[in-house]
Image: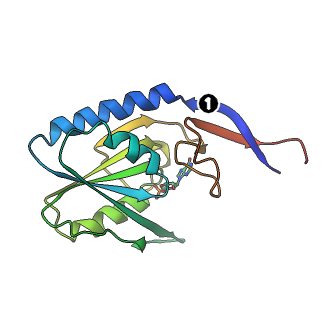
């Protein structure tokens, strides 16, 4: 059975508003410093692109692809599929995520990056589902808190699809067989 769009959850206007708000906040918080933005692939490519345009600071942008092992027990290990291109020691790092769900991926990623001795490390996410958290994690910048629903669009996918939507929607099963 396929999926169809059930309802709109976050509009283009709302996304634009929170990108501007967070961009201004980061610009103020790091005034006089260079920052190192890490785009966690693939889901955060759109958010990173929009957010970065609202940041008025010297800035390096890098990309990383990771997955965390979600077996019966969390091992605290992240598998790196694509690592950063530069050394982050002494840098002011901001990890840019699409969504924080259980928090496992980010907490492992943050621990791993901390061992590389950045000057500071903060977390920024477009969407946050706090009701699903399995591990406590401090998030410094949040676009929008959302309920426990599976969302797609604005970079977020279902099996690789829907990333191109410019707004965020909730899907439901399509009752019609085709
Ligand atoms: P966590 O380790 O459970 O926090 O995993 C976060 C990752 O799960 C995100 O980066 C997404 O790739 C994926 N994810 C969690 N919730 C959703 C959702 O509602 N839609 C699409 N992907 C999601």
Left or right: residue 78 compared with residue 28: right
Hey, which residue is sitting farthest right in the picture? Answer: 177
Image coordinates of residue 61 in percent, x first then y, are 30, 55
Q: Write down the quadrant of residue 89 in the picture.
A: bottom left
Residue at horizontal 39 percent and vertical 40 percent from the top? 50
Residue 11 is at least partly visible in this image: yes
Residue ID for mark 1:
8
Query: Image check: 168 left or right of 34?
Result: right
Instruction: Please identify the quarter of the rendering in which residue 171 is found.
Output: top right
- Whether 155 is drawn above or below 79: the answer is above
Q: Nearer the viewer, residue 10 or 31?
A: 31
Q: Is residue 73 or residue 10 the one in the foreground?
A: 10
Which quadrant of the view contains residue 174? top right
Left or right, 33 with respect to 105, comes to left
Is the image coloured rainbow, by chain, by secondary structure, or in one colour?
rainbow
**Which percent across, then down, holds residue 104?**
42, 60
| Residue 55 position in % (x across, y down) | 26, 39
Measuring 12% from the left and 63% from the top, which residue is drawn there?
90
Residue at 40% x, 58% y is 40
Q: How many marks?
A: 1
Q: Few, some or many C-alpha atoms within 10 Å of disc 1 (few <14, some 14-19, many ≥20)?
A: few
Is any part of residue 76 visible from this angle?
Answer: no
At a point 62% along the width and 30% down the height, the residue shown is: 8
Residue 133 at x, y percent in the picture: 45, 51
Q: Say if 25 sits above or below 128 in the image.
A: above
Q: Cβ of disc 1 within 8 Å of ligand 1?
A: no
Q: Secondary structure at mark 1?
A: strand
């Amino acid at each position: 059975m396929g999926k169809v769009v059930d309802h709109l959850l976050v509009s283009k206007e709302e996304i634009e508003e929170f990108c501007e708000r967070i961009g201004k906040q980061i610009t103020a918080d790091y005034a006089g410093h260079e920052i190192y933005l890490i785009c966690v692939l693939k889901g955060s490519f759109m958010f990173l692109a929009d957010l970065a345009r609202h940041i008025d600071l010297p800035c390096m942008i890098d990309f990383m692809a990771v997955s965390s092992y979600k077996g019966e027990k969390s091992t605290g290990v992240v598998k790196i599929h694509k690592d950063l291109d530069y050394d982050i020691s002494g840098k002011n790092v901001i990890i840019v995520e699409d969504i924080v769900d259980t928090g496992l991926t980010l907490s492992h990623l943050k621990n791993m990056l901390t061992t590389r001795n950045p000057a500071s490390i903060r977390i920024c996410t477009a969407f946050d589902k706090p009701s699903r958290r399995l591990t406590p994690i401090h998030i410094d910048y949040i676009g929008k808190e959302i309920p426990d629903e599976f969302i797609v669009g604005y970079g977020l996918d279902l099996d690789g699809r829907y990333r191109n939507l410019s707004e965020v929607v909730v899907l439901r099963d399509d009752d019609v067989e085709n």
